[in-house]
Amino acid sequence: MLMEVNVLFADRKDAGRKLAVALANFKGQDCLVLALPRGGVPVAAEVALALHAPLDILLVRKIGAPYQPEFAIGAVIDGGAPVIVRNPELIRLSGTTEKQFETICSQQLNEIERRRNLYLRGHKPMSPTDRVAIIIDDGIATGATMRAALHATRLRHPKKLVLATPVAAPDTLEMLRGEVDEVICLESPENFGAVGRFYADFEQTTDNEVVATLARLRARSDVSYATA
């Protein structure tokens, strides 16, 4: 029996505008909006524009099972030292060996380095220390990537850590609540399936779109990026 598709958002920009309304109380606070590339960037850009807040990215990569790359068994996030999040139960269920895990992790770190050079263009990452850090993705299914992002950001001592997303799986959202100070999620449908089924247009966000979005927001006159 086919799962009924319940479209909630026209595209990522539409989702971002709706999410910005839910985050309106943060306007005027010292916020840093942090997006998970690539899909989280167009969503987070709308929030950053609405809150008059700077936008930066968190370079996180999912660690997929060797023969099922979409099956997340962990995640890695870049920083002073990489933060690696493992899901021991899923690693066991997928039959992934330690050597395989380390190999895939190394591959994802190489991709993080590529994206850092491509996206940031010489700009240093902005620090969430003593600020309201709002972490955004276009949706959350298993939560492995988001969990890594939240954990790494918490280590950098934000004043408040907020998870914000247009849509998320209910059990995953509940699991992530303990990682943050506040959760803002517009929709959390049962029988979740995949994030893309809730968007009319879920075309993959390209590297060029990420670069252009970051450059456009950095060019604003209403927000200082001096601490970048």
Image (spheres, helix red, strand yellow):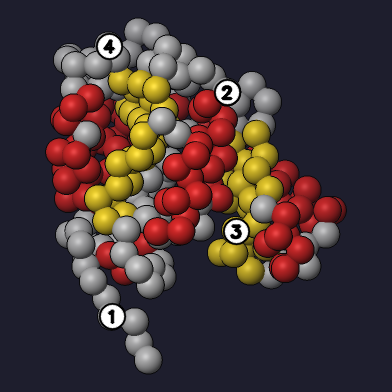
User: Which is more N-terminal, label 4 or label 2?
Assistant: 2
Give neighbour class at mark 2: few <14, some 14-19, many 20+ (Cα, 10 Å): few
Depth-wise, is mark 2 or mark 4 nearer the camera?
2
Element at label 1: loop
With respect to residue 64, does 24 lie above or below? above
Report which residue position mark 2 lands on: 155
Report which residue position mark 1 lands on: 4
180 horizontally vs 200: left or right: right
Report which residue position mark 3 lands on: 72
Query: The residue under label 3 is which amino acid type?
Result: Ala
How many tags in the picture?
4
User: Which is more N-terminal, label 2 or label 3?
Assistant: 3
Query: The residue under label 1 is which amino acid type?
Result: Glu
What's the CA distance linking mark 3 and mark 2? 23 Å
Query: The residue under label 2 is which amino acid type?
Result: Leu
Depth-wise, is mark 3 or mark 4 nearer the camera?
3
What's the CA distance linking mark 3 and mark 1? 24 Å
Residue 208 seen in the figure = no
Query: The residue under label 4 is which amino acid type?
Result: Ser
- Disc number placed over residue 224 in the picture, else none: 4
With respect to residue 32, does 73 lie above or below? below
What's the CA distance linking mark 3 and mark 4? 36 Å
With respect to residue 182, does 85 lie above or below? below
User: Which is more N-terminal, label 1 or label 3?
Assistant: 1
With respect to residue 180, does 53 lie above or below? above
